Structure formats: C-alpha cells, structure tokens
Amino acid sequence: MPVSLLWAVDVYGRVYSLSTAGQQWEHCRDALMEFKRVTAAQQCCWGIACDNNIYLNVHASDLSIRYQEETYENQRWNPVDGFSDRLLPSDRWQWSDITGLQHQPLDSFRLPSGSWEWEGDWFIDENFEGEPTEKGGWTYSIDFPATYTKDKKWNSCVRRRRWLRYRRYKATDTWAKIPSQQSTLPDPFSDISCGGWELSEEPRGRLSLWAVSLQGKVWFREGIHHHNPEGSLWEEVSLPGEVVQISCGPGDLVWAVLWEGQLIVREGIGRDCPKGSSWVVVDSPSPDVGAIHVAVGMNVVWALTKDNKVWFRRGVNSHNPCGSGWINMVGEMLMISVGLNDQVWGIGCEDRAVYFRQGVTSSELSGKTWRVINVPRDGERSHSSASASSLQSAGCYFCGEVRGQSVASDVESDTEKGSTDGATGLVASDYPESLDAPADQTSDGPKPLIPKVTSDSFISELVSDRDSAKTAPSVLPEEDDVPGDGEVTAPSSGAALPQSQSGGPHDPQWSNVDLEEAQILQVQTGLVPESSDTCSLSSVATYTLAMEDQYGADEHPLWAWVSGGGCSVDTHSQLHWFNCSMNSSSLVQSVQSMSLSVSPAQTAAWRKQILEQLSERSKREMDNFRHYEQAIEQSVWVKKGCMQWWRDWKPHKWIDVQFALEQFTGPEGNKDGILFIYYNFCEEKKYLHAFINEITILVPVLNEAKHTFAVYTPERTKQRWPIRLAAATEQEMHDWLALLSVSCCDSRKIQGPPSKQAVWSITCKGDIFVSEPSPALEAMPYPTPCDQMFWRQVGGHLRVVECNSVGVVWGIGYDHTAWVYSGGYGGGFFQGLASSTDNIYTHTDVKSVYIYENQRWNPVTGYTSRGLPTDRYMWSDASGLHERTKTNTKPPSPQWTWVSDWAIDYGVSGGTDREGWQYAADFPASYHGYKTMKDFVRRRRWARKCKLTTTGPWQEIPPISLSDVTILPCATQSSSGVDVVPLWAISNKGDVLCRLGVTALTPAGTSWLHVGTDQPFKSISIGAASQVWAIAKDGSAFYRGSVSPQSPAGDSWYHIPSPAKQKLKQVSVGRTSVYAVDENGNLWYRQGVAPSYPQGSSWEHISNNVRKVSVGPLDQVWIIADKVQGSHGLSCGTVCHRLAVQPLTPKGQSWDYGIGGGWDHVTVRGNSMEPPRFRLPVLSQSVLQVKDVAVNGNAT
Amino acid sequence: MADDKDVLRDVWFGRIPTCFTLNQDEVTEREAEPYYLLLPRVSYLTLVTDKVKKHFLKVMKAEDVGEIWFEYEGTPLKWHYPIGVLFDLHAFNTVLPWSITVHFKNFPDQDLLHCSSNSVVEAHFMSSIKEADALKHKSQVINDMQKKDHKQLWMGLQNDKFDQFWAMNRKLMEYSTEEEGFRYIPFRIYQTMSDRPFIQKQFRPVSPEGKVHTLGILLKEMYPAAIPNEGEQKRYQAVIHGIEPLLETPLQWLSEHLSHPDNFLHICIIPVPTD
C-alpha cells in the first residue's frame, strides 16, 4: 500500500497532513498564509486561503508534468525562390496549428502561468509517422490541406514541418496561486471540492473541481488534466438556488447544499460531460432542520443537518445519484469528508477532533464506528489551545449564534515578495464588508443576527478569530483600522470586490515586520475588542481565544476541515493513528518480529554471527560423522483426500477420484514421494501415478466454478495435457498445492529464496513462477530440455517481471503498480514452512473484467437487444460463445472482489462512438467506432474492476505507474553489491524513466530520472554495454545514444524504422543480440549491430507466432509462443527456448518447447551461468550438423 | 541472504555424533561392541536410544537387565534435559564423538528420574511446552489448540518431522502486533558447578521503558559472573545449541529461533577451557 496523505486544516488555518504510514500530523510549512479549506486528490491538494484565492499544491513527482507545444511552419514552392514562406493569399499562415486555421508564430506561445517554465528551445520534429524524414523534417504535399509524405515529389508544391517545445510545471510541493485570468472574476470562493478522477480512463491528473463563491454561485474549473494541473478557466454553473457547500466524488456524484437547507444533486455527469447537465433537489434528511453539509464518494452520500446530526443516504449509485432515503447515524459532526474507497472522515462536534469511520467496506458502506485519530502534531511550537472555555465558545459559535459570513480580507502578502516569515502576512477584517452585507443590513435589519449557519461561515469566523487574537482591533469595522495601516485598508476593503485578486502594481509595499509591531501595539491597546454594531458572541469568543492563546497547551488540536480525497485506506491498511503514545511509536512498525523493528535484523552483526556459528557447528559436529546411523528412522508418510479429476479419455469430464501422496525418505536421506490418483474405469479400480521428482510444475487454475490445479510432468508438457484436479474447497486446494509444492522442492533439494540466476515467468492469470536454471540449460549441443525445468510458485500477482543476474527483480502489476522483489519466498497460499518469515508483504492488484453487450439492427426498432436465433448471447464474453450478464458475471476467482460497478469501456481497439458502441456488418467481424450503412450489428464493452489482496515477497515502489521495466543483465558477477545497476522503465503514460540508486543491496533504487521523448513509448530494454533500445507507440524503434555509467540517461534518441509495414511492440537486448516482436507476432533479429555501430542495419525475420521475447546476458533467446502443437492440441502462450544460439550463430536454429499454454511472460535475464564447455571430438561434428538440420526442419 | 527459517532448520537438524559403550561392570555373555549414533540435539536421550538398547541387550542376559541409564565421565545424564543441553553442559569443547557409557544396573535414583516408556517423555515434553506458553501467552495459545495439535507437536519431535512440528509450533511463536514480544521469555540457565538444577525466572523481552532486552541483559541479571568485567579475562561461555550468540542478540529473537522444541531457551554457562 503506497503512502498517501490525509489533509486537514486546524481552526487557526494551518494546514497539516497525516501520512497513512505516519504517526503525526505534519505541518505544511510552505503554506504562506492561513487556509480555510482544502480538498485533496492523490496527486495534489487544492485549498482556499484566507485571501479567498484558490491555491494548488501539486505533489512533487520524479515524473514532471510536461506539455508539448507544437506549431507548423508552412511553405510553398515558387519558381523564383523555390520553397519559401511566401504563400498565396488564400493560403494558411506561415506559422499555424495543424489545421492551418490558427495563426501560431513561435513567439506567440506564452507560459500559462508563473508555475511553468520552458524546458528548452523550439526544435524541429524529424519523425514522421514512425519514419525519419529527410533533413529538416519537411513533409510535402500538392497543396494545403492534403496528405503529406516525407518524400519530395515532382508535384510537391507545398511543404510543412512541425516545431516542438516543451514546458514544464515547476510549482510542485508548494502552494501556487491559481491565476485568475478572467476579467469577470467569480467573487471570492468559500468552498471547493475536487473529484471526478474515476470518470474516464485518462491518466491520473484529470480532475473535476467545483467551487462555491460567497454569493452562493457554483463554478466549475475547466480543463484540468495531467498536462494542465491548474485547469484553464472557471465556468459558472446555473443553479436553482444559493449554494453554501458542494462535494464532488471520485466518480459521477456531485451534491451541494442550498442555503435553505435542501440538497441538490447534479445529473448527467459522464465521461463526455464532467460538468453534468441539471440539478435535482433532494430534501433535507430532517423535515425541521435543514442540511448544512454534504460529502459524497464513489457510491455514498453523507450529510449533516444544522443540529450536527449525521445522515447516510441509502441507495446511491451511478444510475440513481439521488439515492432513496436517509438513515440517521450515530455521532455529531461539524463536517464530513469522503475519501478514496468511500472511506469517511469527520470532525467531531464536541471536541473538534478528526474522526475516522471504521469498518467501511464495499459491502458495508456505512461503516461501524467513529474512531478518533489521536496522533500528535510535529514539534512546532504551537499556539493553539484546547482549553475547555475556548472549546465551549467555539462550540456555541457553531450551535447557533453565528452571524453573517465574514470575509478575510485579501492582502497580497504573497510568495513573490519573499517574505521571510510566512506565518503572518494576513490582516483580516471581520465581517460586515462582504458585498452583500451592507445591503442586507439596510434592507433587512435583523438578518445579520440570524445565524447563517454554514460550516463555511464557521471556518471563516475561526480564521478571522485567529487573526483577531493577534490583531484585536481588526475585528472592528475596517474604517477603524489602526492608523498607519492605512495602506492595508485599501486592499482589504477591496477584498470583497472581485478585482482585488488581481494583485499587481497597486499592492501595498509593507513588510511583515511592520505588521508584527502593529499587532503588538494592538494587543496592548485593545484587549477588549469593541465591536461596533453587531456585538456578538463572536467577539466574546474571540476574546476568550485570545486569552487562552497566551498560555495554551498543545494537548488537543482543534480541527476545522479535513479532506480524505487523497488518502488511500482500505480494510487491509494498518494505520497507526489511533492510540499513539510517543515512546512506542518506533516499535509498532513491524508485523513480523520485534527484532525487525528495532534494528535491521537482516544485517545485524549478532544475526550474522549466529548464522556463521551454526554452520560452523554443523561442520564441526556432523561433517566427519556422516556415516553414523541416524537415531530416528524416517518412515513413509501418506496423506489422502478426495478430489475430482478431468479424465484422460473422451468424453472428458470431471470424475471423483481418491488422491494420495506418499512421502518417504530415500536411502541417501533425500525425500521423495509418489502421487496416486485412484479411479474407476468400467467398474474396475485403476490408478494413475506421478513421481514427485518428475513433477515440473503445479499450476493453480482458479475459476468461478471449480478449485482446480494442473500437474505437469515433462511428458505431459509435451502432450499439452496436464493432470487436472479439482478440490472441494479453495482452502483444500491451497493446502494440497502447498504440500505438493514443498514435497516437490524437497525432492529436488530446492529451498529458500530463488537464486539470482533464476528464470521468472508469469501466467495469464498473473501467477508468478520461478525456475532454477542448471548450467546445462544453455549447454551446447545438448541443453536441458525446456520441458524438464522445474517451476515453483511465488506469491503475488503481476503482469511483467524482469530481473538481472545480481538479484535485482522488479515486477509490474495489472494495475501498473511497480514492485521490487524483497528476497523472500512463498507468500500467497504458501503458509508456514513453504514461505519465508521475513520479506513477505501485502500485495494487491486490480484488473478489469470485461463483458460485451451485443445488439442487432432491425428496420422497425433500430438496434435492439433482440438478436437472430443464430446470434450470440446479447450479453456475452469476447468470443460471444458464453453468456455473461452483468449480474451473473463473477470475479475471476473467489480471491478477487469487485471494487467498482459496471461501466462502459471506451478504450477498445478500433474506437467507439460516444456511447461506447462499435459497429460491424455481422458477428463476429472487425468492429469500428462509427456506424455505416452496412452495419447491422453493434457491440460495446463493459468493464468492472476487481481487486486481489494476497501476500508475496514484493514491496511496492510508489508512486509512478509503469508499463514496462528493464534491468541491465550484468554478465559479470560483481561481488560488492554496491555497483549501480542501470534500470529503465516506461510509465503507463509512456514516459521513459531511468531509475537512480539501484544496487544489489538497494534494489528499489531511490528516484526516477525522466528521459524526454517526443512521443509516448511502450517497451524498453537495456543490454550489455549500456545499449538501450525502446519501442515508441507508433511502432518504431529508438536507440539511446551515449548511455554510460557516467551518463546513466544517455543523451539522445536515434530513430530506427520498424520492419516494413510492421509495428513493433516489444524489444529485448542481450549481450549483443537485439530482438523485437511486432504486433502481428513476428520475431525480428537486428542485423549488423556492432560496438562501433550499435544501431545495426536491418531487421531479419526469425519466427512468427511470437508474443514476447526475452534475451539474456548470454544472448540466449526465450519467447512466449502461440500455436504450439502438442499431442492433445494447440497451446497458446508457451515458454520456448531458442536452440543452437552461439556467438557466431546468434539467431539460433530451432525452438524447444517448455511449459505452457497460458503463459504470458518470461525473463531469462538473470541467468548468466555459462554452460559447461564440451570439447567435441571432430568426428561428431558432422553428426551434430545433421541433427541440427533435422531439428531445423521441424521448426515453425 | 539467509532466512531466519534456516536458523530453525539448523537448530532442528543439529546432530551430535555419539559413541555408546557398555559399562565395564555389566555382565555380558560376550564383548559388547561400541555403538555409534547421530543424536538429535533437540531430542531426549531415552527417546532416541532404542537402537542402543537393542544393541547391548543382544550381549546380555535378560535377568541382568535393569532400567537403562547413561553416564558421561562419572556424571549421570538427566534424560529430561535435551540432548544438546547435556552435551553443551558436560562435553562442550571435548573431542568428538561424544562418549557415553550405558548402564543397566545401579540406577542412581537420587540423580535421575525414572523413564519407563516414551509416554513419560511425552508428558514431560508437553508440560514444558505448556509452562512455556503460560509464560509467553498466559497459556492462551496452547489452550486454544486441540488434542491432535498437541499430538502433532509431540509426533513431530518423536519422528524428527521438522515440517510437522513447525506447522504447529509457529503458532506458539506468534504474538500480536501490538505487543513487542512475548509476555515473558521462557528460559533456563544451566551451570555445571552448582547444586541448583537451573535458573528460571520471569523476564520480559522489553523493559518498561521500551528498551529491547538482550542476552547480555538477561545474563547480567541472572548470572552476573557470566559476563566478564571490564579488562577481565572471560571466564564463562554462554552456549545455546553449541554456539555462543553475541551478547547484544535480542532475547525475543533468540526465544523465537533458538528455543528447543519444548519452547524453552536453554542456556548453558560453562567455564572457558583453560588450555
């Protein structure tokens, strides 16, 4: 579980964050002013400061936010000048966008705000549709607009080229003011809420940001996405009333509270319309008491009424955003925040402490109890206080006698002035000067006294209280402001005016020092504030607070606002938030054993010494006495059970069998066993058996119907027909698998973690297997046959695993999470002895399950779900052969649980229309994303996310999601363990990254270095001598120049065209060999790669039906192949080994087939074990050649 | 990187090469050959010497055979101490194989407990485990186990099944994450030159101030002489399973990994050899 943050603001406007791994509130010190509210997402936090401006704090990431600006330079040929920028009058601009309609000279590009910087200067893009262009990057055409080619022809009259420049967002980890570029500014903001990141599949960064202004208007921030974290502009949203507070969930829920106490729900929010279309009014939970606050999540709505009661809305989902009814919950809260996974936080009414709702799960969204978060704040001298009297006064504020909204004045004491003391810099003038207030007073006398009880007013009150405490007279109407602060007065009176936010040259030039002095003066002179007209409890309370402030203790912080939008907590999270005593804090971190938490036990001297002495003892006491008899004789041990077996003969079906494992100790002390399956054949008792030492792999095949696993031997691997067994329960299956696995390992004398040379592979179910290579695996001419390799399972769930020969192993989950191997073994269902005690961690993964909705067109009704009798199911799987409805489709296995609802998937290859449909002439056919006359059927894909939680020897490397990773296969064994290991990766957005600080001892490395590219990449591989090859999204290859230990990121990309008419998708580089796989399953070898010319000369076709390739440090070539023929059928996804790969014949000759089908990934990049060298008698050379030819003849 | 599980294995599979000889005084029909055996360190003498017994009975008359007992250099060996403890206490730093004399008469009642059958060993072993769990978990874990679980622990030891034993024993080695370790560490400190059989007291893995207790702290408290004063010659070795862990080794870790199957940490304090 990556570390994430809970954000909160205390009543003094100070911003704090609490890490899910931490045990104290960290003060956000770079907040140069007090904040009223914050709303967080995982990658950033938005806030309203007391100047009523909105600030954005983007968390720093190794992967910077970059935006590519582009413009086109257009030229036309004329007989005099040749190509020149003299265009025809009807032509486009010399500099334009891609359409030619927009005039875009280079100098017209401006940075959108002060938070951006240029990364470099403009340059010409020399890559055109995956091919390098001739010099200058020009592409030619007959005329504008037309299709362009990179070749200049006789009729090429116009040409253009693309210029690129990158800008980078630099204001990370700091509060950057959102520039208000509009002339018609919204009035000051009073509430803000972000969410909506689950609305589309776009990379993390797209957000919906909703804001409420003091006048009760609602604004939506347009254009926030991962390239543009600040968004572009505010759009007003029309309203049925005046809104006081709004809440936006991660998905399509947006609720707001009206001034009058009803709630409104936004409808029509979707992928194409994040802003929604209309409002629906929902009544307050209580008929007498209006609602005051609302908080929404993915599928939940919580609300508060003015009496602080907590309400939970029943029946909310994306089809019914309004829900069906209210349930009163226990507890009284001032505000509530719903975060990730619909977890709930609140601020208690009584004590203003932050509460966490415990026990919220997807099945029980309302949770169980409120639990107070009880952690200290970091050791800043605090002037907050929590005495009973101030608490009371705070409480009574909220409970009724609160007047009209107060406005903290807007004084631009902002960052650019470089004020040294950021804590102050704020002068707050209390309420009545908000724009509408005077009007209210005149037109409607009593109104200011009527409590306008919104949590917002409360916060502003408190924020201003804090200031009043320091600058007491400022509670007075502003015209009474302290003499000498006159300059301040002007802008502060303008606070309520929209223009005040412009800042600029009118800013008063005063320093903080002046202000401090003024404050002291004020405190001395005006201890008892004389509120002029509406002398209310506010000022009394202010006074109390001010008094308390002098000697307040920091026992109990008072919180004003909390946001869990960036805080990832689920039922498996271990939080240390609840009973934190200061001294135990360092001891509770370890799950395993205390020794771990106290010192790094793995490296402690005492531990090392024990291990050494034990092995010394064994040597001393046993080595010379091996011939002695053992005192205890080993006996045969049998475990029996009942199972079902997928019988070998036709018709294949499951039959009940007796299952027995006999284990015994052989004469040499080695353990072995036999597996027996007793069955009835024509009423005759028969049995099938397998020697434990012949079993090569045990594969769990969990599906919704049966708990099955497959047992392979070399013979059965050849047949592609394993022994398939089904246990009655999942637990029974896991027990058997663990037992059989231990038994197999014992018989092969394999124990402990996998070696550094291990070969790793992954099945299409995400199960991870590892095999210990023997030196004979790459031997010539008779390597160990691939089907004899023994594979054992390792806990966890991954899509990609990569390793190298110093033991650095990285994995990538289906949800693109990066994991590093921790050095343990076991995990998952391998409990107890089959698993290491240390280095096993919680492992999660999320993947989508897809079903298809199919429809046929008929002339009367158009497309309906009534198909022809011959048609597929109207709800089906991808093949159409199996019915899959939304209700009957279950997660892939009982280990998976749903974490989302069904949603239309727009990311289908071929494209979709706005409703996600793809059209075709008939089932099954190739689908396209638009309707034509010839289309009679359509389908769309629905996706639902499910989550697996298991354990394994993997530790997460947050926060950047990856799609590919590669580690330099070090052929030479470096013993020191401190040598830096080059590791490159591709983020799931396609950025190329280089990991720094990776060594054998610190395999996780320290940070990412971003390597710029002009387009997203999808595959990368680093081979010996720092050859880095990568595949771009357009299917062409790139070679990275000048990569070396001194310059780990290299200097530039060399474009390498893909094989003709093929788009490459994956690359793997060994010692000298470079192999790539294209999207049509062809395997290509790069010819002519030489140290002096590392880019090589051309691609040579090696094989087809290849899904993935892994080239090892000895240039050994392994692939995942499709369509491998076995005696019982074809198999897809088979691990294959290239035979006869030699330094002089790097392309090898034929394939040897190993485990499969159903395999997705293999990596041999850890295996640097040189095969034993044979000196063949000269005579047998000819025999060998004959054999090779024979084998070659059989190759695919 | 070696795993802590390897430590468990090494401890379990520790063997002491032993040469059994029949006492000169025994009446035999013919000369008895010595018998050589690898004794598991973690087991008990009477549990693993059926073969020895059979071997010597072959040369003896049935009427001369009393209850078997063992002696090393004049010291009767207490079968209810683990074999490894007996060896470390009496024969550490001597030449291997360990030479044990077998007696069939003159049972030293004042020194040894009678052991009529394996069920006596079982009862002793199980009572040790229960005592240890009382110290570690207020007996909660052992009481939650079923009869067959107890049997599995015993059968594991009796049949030298590491996996079988540890599948159950690991439950006895767990503790909740909120605590820093066991309630008390079950330990026994043995010494050769003492009338007291062993030292056993209540001792926590962590001090009230949250400081981790180490082997050194335990010894200082229980047997100060075992720790040399500054500048002094080391006089005693603290031996566990034939090794001398560093004094800074955390006690909790030792208890989890170097305890005998009876769940006690048996520490032998022996004089440093003078030669």
Image (tube, coloured by chain):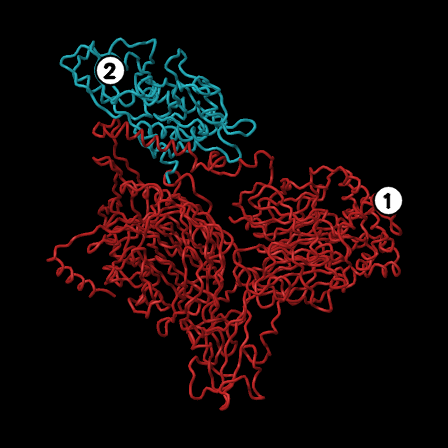
Chain colours: A red, B cyan
Q: Residue at x 50, y 55 (%)?
A: A960
- Label 2 SS: strand
Q: Please give the label number shown on residue A1120.
A: none
Q: Is residue A1062 above or below residue A381?
A: below
Asked if one can make out residue A245 in the rendered structure from this viewpoint, the answer is no
Tally of numbered discs: 2
Tag 2 subunit: B
Callout 2 amino acid? Val
- Rate crowding at label 2 as few (under 14), some (14 to 19) or many (20 or more) other CA atoms within 10 Å: many
Q: Residue at x 51, y 48 (%)?
A: A1
Tag 1 subunit: A
Asked if one can make out residue A539 in the rendered structure from this viewpoint, the answer is yes
Q: Is residue B260 above or below residue A349?
A: above
Locate residue A212, reporting x and y percent: 71, 60
- Which residue is labeled 2 in the image? B102
Name the quadrant containing residue A1136.
bottom left
Residue lying at the far left in this picture: please name it. A1179
Callout 1 amino acid? Thr
Locate residue A620, reporting x and y percent: 28, 28
Q: Is residue A123 above or below residue A527?
A: below
| Foreground residue among A215 and B114 | A215
Q: Nearer the viewer, mark 2 or mark 1?
A: 1
- Rate crowding at label 1 as few (under 14), some (14 to 19) or many (20 or more) other CA atoms within 10 Å: few
| Foreground residue among B56 and A39 | A39
Q: Are marks 2 and 1 on the same chain?
A: no
Locate residue A135, reporting x and y percent: 44, 77
Name the quadrant containing residue A1059.
bottom left
- Which residue is labeled 1 in the image? A525
Locate residue A272, reporting x and y percent: 58, 68
- Label 1 SS: helix
